[in-house]
Image (cartoon, rainbow, N blue to C red):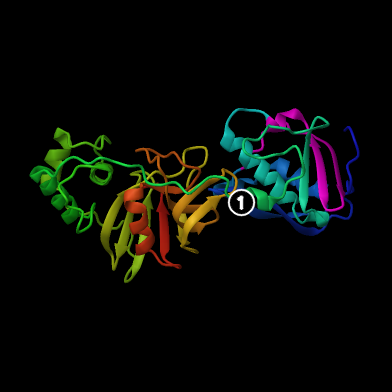
Amino acid sequence: MAGLLAGGSTSAAKPGLSVYFLRGEQVAPVSRSGSTALEAVRALLRGPTRAEASRGFRTYVPRGIRIRSLNVAGGIATVDLNERFAGGRDTGSLLARLAELVRTLTGVQGTKKVQLLLDGSPAVARFPGVNTGKPITFRSLQTPNVPVPEPPPFRLPPPDPEVKALQQKLIQLGYMIHGDDDGRFGPATQNAILGFQKWERLPRTGLMDAKTNVRLDIATRPVPITHGGAGKRAEILLDRQVALLIRDDTVVRAISVSSGKPSTPTPPGSYKVYAKIPRWWSTPFREWLPWALPFVGGIAFHQYPDVPAFPASHGCVRQLYSVARWTYNFAFVGMPVKVLSRS
């Protein structure tokens, strides 16, 4: 192995390292043995264990990374990796692996900044939006570099009695809420139709096609999959791509969502909302996640501009702007969230 590997002895390894992988939209720690920067990076390159992966931990560091050298001096960890660390064109993956590395090294052996080298040279202009040509801090990755997104402008059509009747039916069934029946067909109505189609296991078109129209006439309000008793709670149904917001075992609202894609799935289990964050910043992916309700690690309900009819996220539960704030207001810190593979 080329270069000096400072602190390379593992004979005195003892518990105390936190190594950071991705869990949804944030980095999250796992415990490893050791005490040196070298041991921390080696553990990072080994990736999460199978048990950790089942709980939603993922690494974006590609296989085949070699440590050419690693020195810590004056609060700066200078780590020289092979060129493969900056390989690929996916911006999200590049930023995520950089965040994993910088956060893992921060604090170890007094590290405050990380200087990344690739095959002996500074990693200039390799990570979009981040100046890795000089030492960087994890705080700099936590600092937003883009404005908070605004909801896209829409020019809604004039009110239509048939649309109003449709909206009133969707309100009655729990896909829209009282006051939504303005008679204008827009994103909120389309999203409610998509939620209805998902629950009823119809083709996911978001349009009032013939099958949807027939089913709407005989449909009943969704019911919870599990029994939870009094109070508010949520169920996320991965197979249907629907979230049920429940009060006293009655579905208040059924919402079309997009959960984690196959490579970064939303882990099934029982959780609780641990924070309410109106403007959440995804440190690894450097994007805003408004109206966030994290319930395990960096996995949360949040607003997102792209909410397809299928699983597409990094593990979070995406919602359109037309419903995300309502969900945020409905929830409370400590609210139970159950993620179900099959409903």
Q: Which residues are magenta?
A: 59-86
Tell me which amino acid carries mark 1: Thr
> Is residue 251 positioned above or below 2 on the image?
below
Residue at 41 percent across and 67 percent down: it is 332
Residue at 59 percent across and 49 percent down: it is 283
Q: Secondary structure at mark 1?
A: loop
In the image, residue 304 lies at what x, y percent? Answer: 42, 45
Residue 109, magenta (yes or no): no
In the image, residue 6 lies at what x, y percent? Answer: 89, 45
Q: Is residue 218 visible from the viewing direction of this image? A: no
Q: Nearer the viewer, residue 21 or 267?
A: 21
Horizontally, residue 245 falls left or right of residue 338, namely left
In the image, residue 114 lies at what x, y percent? Answer: 77, 46
In the image, residue 56 lies at what x, y percent? Answer: 55, 48
Horizontally, residue 296 falls left or right of residue 10, namely left
Horizontally, residue 24 falls left or right of residue 15, namely left
Badge 1 is on which residue?
143
Taking the view exactly as shown, the residue that stands out farthest to the left is: 161
